[in-house]
Image: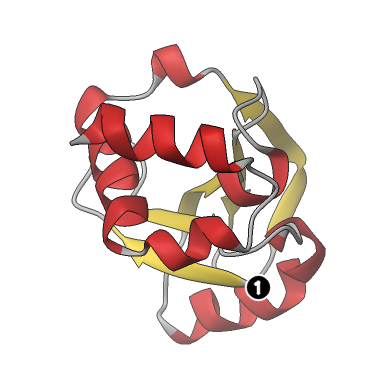
Amino acid sequence: MFKIRHLKDSQYKVVVVATGYDTPLSCLNIIAQRLTEEAFHGPVLFDLLCSNGLEDNRFASISFDGKSFLKKTFHVVDEQLLPKQLLKNQNEFFITHESILSASVLTKSEIYNLVSAAR
């Protein structure tokens, strides 16, 4: 499943977080419906830590036009290019929702390292 988070970041106001090993990218229609109800449009960041692990494709972005995702705009986002505060917010989210990490593809060692590094 997934959780939609609203941020005050200038680049990404919405982050869709994978909350288990299933990718939220398979739920784009449901996510689009929710974003439409919120009258949102703009780039949407996907944090796929729980479904992809600590890989280069942890983050991806797709533009949303207010009704649907523009699938041709999909791209993997290099973590190094994201604002440090956004990364900090995401990692803090996982620390406060550590049970989400237990339902992820991460090993116990990776979870421990992630939580320890963020504290």
Q: Which colour scheme is used?
A: secondary structure
Q: Is residue 33 left or right of residue 70?
A: left
- Percent of width and height locating residue 47: 53, 45
Residue extending farthest to the bottom is 37
Q: Position of residue 30 (x, y in %)?
A: 69, 80
Q: In which quarter of the image is the N terminus?
A: bottom right
Could you tell me how many numbered marks the image carries? 1
Q: Which residue is drawn at 75% across and 70% down?
A: 27
Tell which residue pokes out farthest to the top in this image. 80
Residue 107 in view, yes or no: yes
Can you identify the residue that label 1 sits on? 1
Q: In this view, does 94 lie above or below 80?
A: below
Decide if residue 18 is in sight here. Answer: no
Could you tell me which residue is drawn at 66 percent across and 27 percent down?
76
The image shows residue 118 at horizontal and vertical percentages of 25, 33
113 left or right of 83?
Answer: right
Decide if residue 11 is on the left or right side of residue 73.
Answer: left
**Residue in view at x 54 percent, y 82 percent:** 34
Q: Residue at x 69, y 62 (%)?
A: 24
**Residue 11 quadrant:** top left
> Residue flagged by tag 1: what amino acid is it?
Met
Q: Categorize mark 1 by other alpha carbons within 10 Å: few (<14), some (14-19), many (20+).
A: some
Element marked by disc 1: loop
Residue 12 placement (x, y as % from top left): 36, 43
| 95, above or below 97, in the image | above
